[in-house]
Image: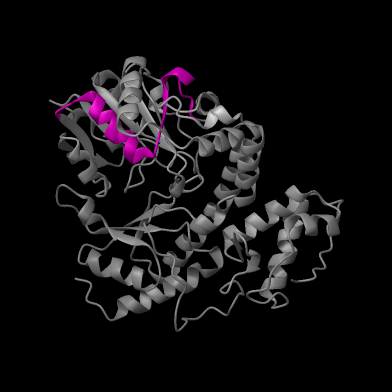
Amino acid sequence: MADLHIPIDRGKGAIAGQVATELREAIRQGRLEAGTRLPASRELARDLSVSRGVVVEAYEQLVAEGFLLARVGAGTVVAATARREPARVRERAPYYGHRPTSPDLGGFPRERWMAAVRHVLTTVPSDAFDYGDPGGVPELREELASYLKRVRAADVSADNLVIVGGVAQGLSLILHALRSPKLAVEDPTSHRQVPLLRRTGAELVPIPVDEEGLRVERLRGVGAVLLTPAHQYPTGVVLSPARRAALMEWGGVVVEDDYDAEFRFDRDPVGCLQGLAPDRVILSGSVSKSLAPGLRLGWIAAPPDLAEAVRRARGELDLGSPVIEQYALAHLLRTGGYDRNLRRMRREYKKRRDALVRALAEHLPELVVRGIEAGLHIYLDLPQDWDENEVAAAARAAGLSAEEVGQMRFTEGPPAIVMGFARVPAHHADDVIARMKVSMSGQRKG
């Protein structure tokens, strides 16, 4: 275990930032080598005469940046790829690929989550672990209602919230309750959602998306529409004020996937549609990006009669979500830990996005970057004669997560790819895009 000398100037403030800076420089200069185990947060806090929270915040920041790895049972260690190297094409690049929309799971706030679970296990009465309300733990619904009002301008109460196993299950339950034979969806849209939607028996009606979002005037002959107004996937456009107004006048049921609402970088967050018309807009969201998709925790805010139908269906299908995780999330929301983690990851993702966009502008200026105001992915328009399959393959060969937009379309469209940036540390972006360019150089683009 490393013995660390970390000078702190208490007059400057931002103690956690100073600790992170000193550790980062020690790693870059080779004074802390790959695999070195760092002291436990409580031990280092005692040595530095600071609060444990200061060290936890510094460690979490460096984990998010890729300098450290945090492993349960193994402590915090220096990552193998952390030391800065001269910009060049390496023999083998780190692999950052997964779904382009995936968060950096190294940023999961392990210590805060463990503290929340520990609090639950030491304070919650034993009968709370029995079968409960299939709609979710009341404490979590209360905290979520308060959070959604404050952050998303939602018009919601605990009574019309249902806790679900992520947005995917939420959509299945909503469509089961709606029994609508026709469902309008965005074109393009997430191709992974399409089989799930069709399995409910809904007939999908594709509606084009342009620079203002869904073409609301095309909503004819359908009773419900599913859309991502805060940051459309995959294009990244935000539903314009005019389209929002037109959607409210349309009169059908709106299923609002609050996709990417947590991570706004270059503009103020846009309030959810549900707050405008809570009697016919169903809001769905989850912690899959803000914390981790493996938690399988999400929610639905719906009009009272529909919320009751969804709660009843949840009880018939699987009796509800795991209660310990629900209580832990409620604790994070109540104590501010959830907000603090979001702020930390928002700063880090913005750095990563900026670094990737700069690298693309330098190495591949032919690509037009769009949809970068929010979220964890960018949308890249390709020259008309380029093959999106080959460009996406080159990105994946370089270690990036990338997908062809063609597979997300119901109708033909210009070549484009989606690229994720959440798992690419800022100091690796230039190297990775350089590798992508080299991989593309031997491929036919037309």
Residue 131 sits above or below residue 376 on the image: above
Q: Furthest residue to the bottom?
A: 91
Residue 236, position as x, y percentages in the image? 36, 46
Give me the residue at 45% from left, 60% from top: 357
Residue 11, position as x, y percentages in the image? 87, 51
Q: Nearer the viewer, residue 107 or 73?
A: 73
Q: What count of labels does the image hold? A: 0
Give me the residue at 39% from left, 54% from top: 378
* Colour scheme employed for the rendering of this structure: one colour
Is 153 one of the magenta-colored residues? yes
Q: Is residue 427 left or right of residue 252?
A: right
Q: Is residue 187 left or right of residue 16?
A: left
Q: Is residue 240 left or right of residue 181?
A: right
Give me the residue at 64% from left, 68% from top: 77
Q: Is residue 77 left or right of residue 196?
A: right
In this view of the protein, can residue 357 be seen by the observer?
A: yes
Residue 117, position as x, y percentages in the image? 60, 42
Residue 398 sits in quarter: bottom left
- Per the rendered image, the range of residues in magenta is 152-181
Residue 194 sits above or below residue 36 on the image: above
| Quadrant location of the C terminus in the rendered image | bottom left
Give me the residue at 78% from left, 52% from top: 15
Q: Nearer the viewer, residue 295 or 426?
A: 295
Residue 374 sits in quarter: top left
